[in-house]
Amino acid sequence: MAFDRVWLDLRAPADLRARDAGLLAKAIVHAGRDGRVLDLGCGTGATVRAFAAAGAQDLDWCLLDNDQALLSEARMRHPGAEIRLCDLTDLDMLPLTDVRLVSASALFDLVSEAWARRLVERLARTQIALYAALSYDGVMRWTPQDSSDAEVTERFNRHQRGDKGFGPALGPDAGARLAEMLRARGYQVLCAPSPWHLGPQDAKMQALLLSGIAEAAQEAGFAGAERWAARRRRMIARSRVEIGHLDLLAVPCDG
Ligand SMILES: C[S@@+](CC[C@H](N)C(=O)[O-])C[C@H]1O[C@@H](n2cnc3c(N)ncnc32)[C@H](O)[C@@H]1O
């Protein structure tokens, strides 16, 4: 999917409903009052809004992204935050000084195993906590069912493992692999499912999602992907889908 403002705004209500409230509350406690939080791949600032909606309105945010248009939107929506244009593939430039918590939403399924490992090493060296929400976990459950659902999911998941700028992406394995890496570096790791549950009331989001999924499945070699999407569009008024995600909070053992 393209990460434009329209798509990010469309998915925002589903993201807010999906986030695990318990992990978010614990992340807020860990950030502390006025704590500095670094949000990776911030888009328009959805993580800031999720924290604020859960009661954390006084954090010292630093928002990082490589998309100037999204950052301009984030600057308008969050004038108090520090906004930085940066390419996250270069981990050496992460401004980690005084940071209590690193956060990211819907980012880790895009990154590679090597990149995630390097990030975990950097965080572990300075004992910084990580809150990584909404990593896609490979699950798609549609009702009513279609005979091509399983094939589409398999091809989409294959596409998710392609290079998204960080090397071969972790895709659906992101949450589980990240948890393993963090535990191996001595972090206390909590995970919780955070699936989207979309129904007929989310028809606009479903329509855009169908296009993105079909395009990816087609690029991954499924010739029937567009026909699948067309069938699904015709039943959108009664269509429901669960799209699986995982939320993760990792805290240094003495944190
Ligand atoms: C799925 S969007 C999530 C945006 C936001 N966190 C949210 O939850 O709405 C992924 C974000 O990662 C950013 N991104 C992708 N690759 C990046 C890179 N190499 N450096 C910095 N940001 C990147 C995109 O521009 C986009 O804003």
Image (cartoon, rainbow, N blue to C red):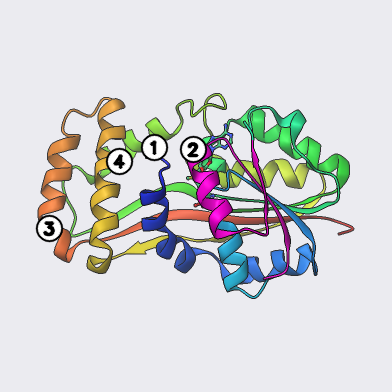
Q: Residue at x 26, y 55 (%)?
A: 206
Earlier in the chain: of badge 4 and badge 2, it is 2
Contact flag, marks 1 and 2 (Cβ < 8 Å): yes
Q: Residue 97 vs residue 17: left or right?
A: right
Q: Report the disc number at residue 212.
A: 4
The amino acid type found where label 2 is placed reads: Gly
Q: Is residue 24 magenta?
A: no
Residue at the spot of label 1? 157
Q: Alpha-carbon distance for marks 2 and 3?
A: 28 Å
Density class for disc 2 (Cα within 10 Å; few <14, some 14-19, many ≥20) is: many
The answer to whether mark 4 is within 8 Å of ligand 1 is no
Q: Is residue 69 magenta?
A: yes
The nearer-to-camera label among 3 and 4 is: 4
Q: Report the disc number at residue 235.
A: 3
Label 3 sits on a secondary structure element that is loop
Q: Alpha-carbon distance for marks 4 and 1?
A: 12 Å
The answer to whether mark 2 is within 8 Å of ligand 1 is no
Earlier in the chain: of badge 3 and badge 1, it is 1
Q: Report the disc number at residue 9.
A: none
The nearer-to-camera label among 3 and 1 is: 3
Report the number of discs.
Answer: 4
Quarter of the image holding residue 60?
bottom right
Residue at the spot of label 2? 171
